[in-house]
Image (cartoon, rainbow, N blue to C red):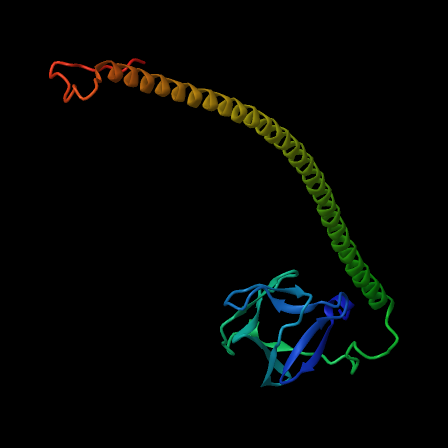
Amino acid sequence: PHQPSQQWFIRRAGDKYHIEDCLYGRYLVPEYTGRGARVNLGRYPANWEILSVGDDKYIFKVAGHDLDLHGGENGAEIHIWQRNVTEPQKIWKLDRLSDFAGNTPEVFSAASKDALIGRLTEQLEEKDGQLAEQEERIDNQAQELQELKKESAEKDQQLSELNQVINKLLVRMADGKGDAMADFRRNSEGGVESEVSSLREQVSRMESFLSQWKGVGEIHEMPNNMTLQAGK
């Protein structure tokens, strides 16, 4: 009856206790702290109160609820329920096997050694799994980084090509603008000279026309029906 799978280390932790399985090194903990929660083995300890009810009988209490055996058959589940000292499924008897608390140097049994090796192996496998996940994430991040670098290089190349096209276009526009300005100047100068010549011709005609009517002190005013028209 006293197999390692049925033995427990009970260690004081302040004014509470931690209950550890002798075979696997896991702690007795409820799945949650509410009424009816199932009790399993967990990696981290729960703080239990151990209250004596006389005759070497005890109640195990956690988060305001009592440890409750849910049936008398082998493999029956354990839960936590509200306190009721009159219910026998909540009352436990402890058999003291030794003063060994599991945390001091001592010769372990073969089963305890196997359990320790199994626990360490499990922890190593878990660490290996975590490392593999981290390596996979790192590889994915490195791949994403390479893709981003490639996209950045492609965009830089596109920008460089676009700048070259813009520079060529600006040069062509500048050359075209210079030609257009020269044409404008030439056309403007020709137009001004033409206008000046036209005006000079009109003035000359006016002077010639007036000279025909000018006498030596005889002409005082022009006839009322005289119309002057400047030629163009």
Q: Quadrant of the C terminus?
A: top left
Quarter residue 179 falls in: top right
Q: Image height check: is 153 above or below 39?
A: above
Residue 116 locus on image (x, y percent) = 82, 66
Q: Nearer the viewer, residue 116 or 188?
A: 188
Quarter residue 152 falls in: top right
Q: Nearer the viewer, residue 43 or 86?
A: 43
Q: Image height check: is 81 above or below 59?
A: above
Q: Quadrant of the N terminus?
A: bottom right
Which residue is located at x 60 percent, y 62 percent?
Answer: 77
Residue 5 locus on image (x, y percent) = 75, 66
Q: Residue furthest left?
A: 224
* Left or right position of 171 against 221: right
Q: Nearer the viewer, residue 120 or 177?
A: 177
Which residue is located at x 46 percent, y 24 percent?
Answer: 188
Q: Residue furthest front?
A: 216
Residue 222 locus on image (x, y percent) = 15, 18
Q: Nearer the viewer, residue 177 or 39?
A: 177
Q: Give the number of callouts.
A: 0
Residue 209 locus on image (x, y percent) = 26, 14
* Left or right position of 154 against 231: right
